[in-house]
Image (cartoon, coloured by chain):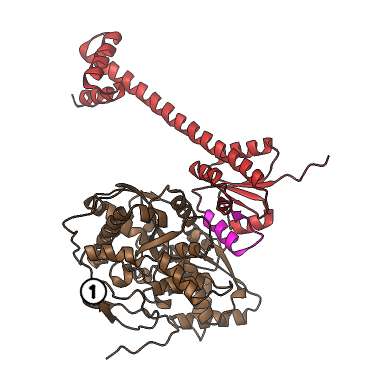
Amino acid sequence: MTDLTLPDTLPTPEKCALTLGYVPLIDAAPLIVARENGYFDDCGLDVSLSREASWASIRDKLQLGLLDAAQIPAGIPLAAAFGIGYGQRPLVCSMSLGLNGNAITVSRELHAQLSRRAEFSATPAGTGAALKGHLRDNPEATLTVATVYTHSMHSFLLHYWLDACCIDRSRIREVVVPPPQMVDTMHRGLIDAFCAGEPWNSAARDRGVGEVLVSGYQIWRNAPDKVLGSTADWAAEHPASLQLLIMALLRACAWLDDPDNREAMLALLRRPEYLGEGLMQPDPDIGRHRFFGAAANFPWLSQARWLLEQIQHGQPPRHPAEIDALARQTYRSDIFRQAGAALGLNLPLTESKPEGVHEHDWTVEGSQGPLSLPGDRLFDRPALEPPN
Amino acid sequence: MKHPPAIKVLVIDDDRARAALLEQSLRDQGYQVLARLDNTDLLAERVEELQPDIIIIDLDSPDRDVLENMALLNDRSPRPVVMFAEQGDSDTIAQAIRSGVSAYVVDGLESGRIRSILDVASARFREFQALRRELVEARSELADRKLIEKAKGLVMKRHKCSEDEAFKAMRRMAMDQQKPLAEVARSIIAVMEII
């Protein structure tokens, strides 16, 4: 485990008593662990966690100042920068909370039909080809597919996979279903498939309702997902509180990164005030969560730009310079760098990296020498050869 | 004079009692309440079918993300009320959200009407919150009184004194220890039960 030691002198927080919002998912773990392991206390912060039922509620409460900061899908602050979504105050992301965590699950009936097909293989291309064949052979069929939020990685990964497999999206009826209702909705035959974060894919499989067709990790290896969000005003008015918050969360992420701590993490998440017993025993191979490291925590501008491109899909295209400016004002790597440097982390020298082209681990220049990053291949992109 | 068609309101709230209270108030003010939904199956379809002008929904309902999606993808759909926060009416919205109300409205609905519906909803939600708090307080008061009675009985039995003397002794203890009477009663019961 990476041992992160706090600096000898900590800044004095402008505000000590903070309320952070989260939605009960495995990727809320950094917030829960930072609280339960005392990392917030170590930073002189008195943090209460507020469990929220929807991302809309988190966004509204951030806007109104009822929450100081929150776990939030990376797409929400970026969509707000575009003026899509609602609320007047710009939101910023000052840290990424981890990678991966999603999967596409289909009903058992659909899985049986797809896996019988000759085109089928357990890869994004193979499952996509099987789905395409299935739709071709059933010209009347429309599939109902649920995601959990419009501007979240679940929707983006689903769309990316469908488009890369040349599946006619007009044959897919997309709906939003709140995650806790996902398994039940599939059980009652109201949806054929869903793309959601863990533990809901594991839950569908364990209850005999659905099978994982393809994981988010298979579509985009080590894809970004949730971030730490706050309003830009809050970040500007509470720079020291925010630094301390990031430091505490980074220590939680380092703890979570140790596979030996997985059972302890699940025990914490299973507490009734967090995810509850419904969490059961999620399969680590579905979520493939990575909580710590430069890839997992640095707010990469290249990822912000990728997300902005997905969000603006179907809208009048914008100039790349405008996209870049919106990415920069929302993804505040400068704030992250300050906290990362205080903890002695090796930080990348650039704000962007080539996305989606690395099959294996690769290396960038870091503030303390070479910095290893995990593969980040998008399944349909040709992989770059690792430099010799 | 012809009346303008009544504004059609859809109420989504898991708390049936609160939803009923709100529905009544809205009807009293001349609004048409299309339905009161709690556990909703594929809410999006119900909304398309009912075509409400405004949806009042519990701020903490997980179904809000369903409505967000409709609002983002479909022009006809109700649009989130936070939209008109940008038109300078953020106080009404802030107050609604603090009361636990959120709303989605169709484009073009006159903002004065929206405000009056939101005000009714916020008031009813707050009222209901207060009622619930009173109920909790009343329950705990009753529980306290039972504890005090029980402790008094134990003191009377052990010290073979009158009810009045037992009560005075307990009150003296409470004053000396600067604790509420119910707490003193609780510790008396705990101690006596060990003995």
Q: Is residue A348 above or below residue A38?
A: below
Identify the secondary structure beneath mark 1: loop
Give x and y (percent) for residue B112: 65, 44
Chain to which mark 1 belongs: A
| A7 horizontally vs A319: left or right | left
Q: In front: A297, or A235?
A: A235
The residue positioned 27% from the left and 62% from the top of the image is A339
Instruction: Give the labeled residue for mark 1.
Output: A367
**Magenta range:** B63-81
- The C terminus of chain A - image quarter: bottom left
- Residue A203 visible to an observer of this rendering: yes
- Residue A23 visible to an observer of this rendering: no
Q: Say what amino acid the circle numbered 1 marks.
A: Ser
Q: Is residue B135 above or below residue A267?
A: above
The residue positioned 38% from the left and 67% from the top of the image is A101
- Most extreme residue toward the right is B1
Q: What chain is colored red?
A: B
User: How busy is the neighbourhood of tag 1: few (under 14 within 10 Å), some, or many (20 plus)?
Assistant: some
Q: In front: A143, or A26?
A: A26
Give x and y (percent) for residue A210: 47, 68
Give x and y (percent) for residue A44: 24, 49
The residue positioned 48% from the left and 72% from the top of the image is A323
Count of labels in the image: 1
Q: Quadrant of residue B172?
A: top left
Q: What chain is colored brown?
A: A
Give x and y (percent) for residue A247: 26, 59
Q: Is residue B119 above or below residue B85?
A: above
Q: Quadrant of residue B28?
A: top right
Assess whether residue A385 is covered by the magenta stretch.
Answer: no
